[in-house]
Image (cartoon, grey):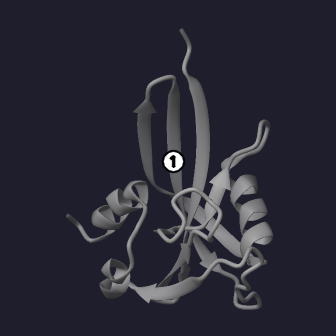
Amino acid sequence: MNKKQIEVVAGVIFDGELLLACQRPAGKSLAGFWEFPGGKVEPGETLERALHRELAEELDLQVTILDEMYRLEIDSGDKKLILHFLRAIKKSSSEAHSCEQQQFKWLKRSELNSVQWLETDREFVNYLAGR
């Protein structure tokens, strides 16, 4: 039996030394937890195009995507989730705005543990911290 494969992009967005974190809004699964912004990759979409689309929809934010920093694969029964963490830089002419009533913060690396991350993003935060 073939597992359904779901690809998700997460933007590791830098503005100087700061990183962007978003809180999942009320009404969504795992509401209240924090994550790197992004979402599911649509059929036929590249990872980069998916991240640009998600950031435009959620935060009206424009970035320059540099590379994939980290990849996490999770098997859960009949599904396989592949989470791509893409390093990006906020364009100086663009500012984040909450389009879906979610909270967001720009955090220093030393402040990353000040929020409660989704479990999948927690693994990446530990990777960033060198743990």
Q: Nearer the viewer, residue 34 or 37?
A: 34
Left or right of 43: which side holds 110? left
Q: Secondary structure at mark 1?
A: strand
Three-letter amino acid code of the residue under disc 1:
Leu
Can you give x and y, in whole percent of width and height, for residue 56 in the image? 79, 70
Can you give x and y, in whole percent of width and height, for residue 41 in the image? 69, 46
Instruction: Determine which residue is flagged by label 1.
Output: 83
Left or right of 90: which side holds 112? left
**Quarter of the view holding residue 111:** bottom left
Q: Residue furthest left?
A: 131
Q: Nearer the viewer, residue 33 or 64?
A: 33
Question: Does residue 17 lie above or below 67 as drawn?
Answer: below
Can you give x and y, in whole percent of width and height, for residue 28 in the image? 63, 60
**Quarter of the view holding residue 72:** top left
Q: Mark 1, residues whose alpha carbon is within 10 Å: few (<14), some, or many (≥20)?
A: many
Can you give x and y, in whole percent of width and height, for residue 24 in the image? 57, 68
Number of labels in the image equals 1
* Residue found 43% across the figure and 61% down from its top: 118
Task: Identify the image quadrant of the C terminus.
Answer: bottom left
Q: Residue furthest front?
A: 27
Q: Residue furthest top?
A: 1
Left or right of 113: which side holds 90? right
* Residue found 62% across the figure and 71% down from its top: 25
Question: Does residue 103 lie above or below 122 as drawn?
Answer: below
* Residue found 76% across the figure and 43% down from its top: 42
